[in-house]
Image: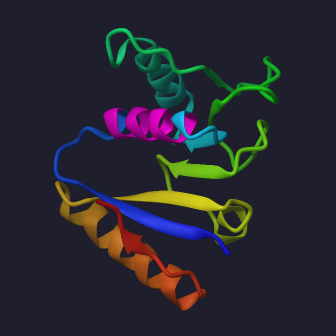
Amino acid sequence: MTRVSFIKIKKPEKARHLCELADEFFGEGQKVLITVMDENQAVTLDRFMWTWRKGSFLPHAYHNGAVDCSSEAVTIVTEEKNPNGANVLVMGKPCSLAFIRQFEEVVDFAEVHEPQRAAEARRRFLRYREEGFEPHMRE
């Protein structure tokens, strides 16, 4: 069964959280897929991953259709595709339940710094529960 967890974000720093999670899971030897809203966010995150922490290296690629990402440890996508065969999904944007079920572990975000996004996260949390997942807050 897919494990779903949420991370509470109190400031608009999602890119940093995406990098930290990718680095954590990569360090555990897992392949990671990160979803983002659009090409602008994908390119921005791709660039940020090269500089987000001094001295670190996080192998990654943005799957834009022009690059084979099948062997990449971390792949950034804008659509619900899993080109690197990842077992971990980090949702920079919400995904469908059918897509989520393809992964062993899924991380979602509760962006409490913005009331509308916080309400949307609460609705997703409840929906996951209704669909048989056991979502929990991640430390």
Viewer-nearest residue: 48 or 80: 48
The residue under the point 63% across, 70% down is: 2
Q: Which range of residues does the magenta coloring cover? A: 16-26
Name above or below for residue 58 compared with residue 27: above
Give the residue at x 59% y 87%: 132
Question: Residue 118: x percent and y percent?
Answer: 26, 66
Horizontal and vertical percent for residue 92? 47, 46
State how the image is colored: rainbow
For image coordinates 44% across by 59% down, the residue present is 108
Q: Quadrant of the N terminus?
A: bottom right
Residue 88: x %, y % from top left = 62, 51
**Is 21 a magenta residue?**
yes
Residue 32: quarter of image: top right
In the shown orientation, is residue 90 left or right of residue 61? left
Q: Is residue 35 left or right of residue 19?
A: right
Is-magenta flag for residue 37? no
Residue at the top extreme of this rendering:
55
The quadrant the C terminus occupies is bottom left
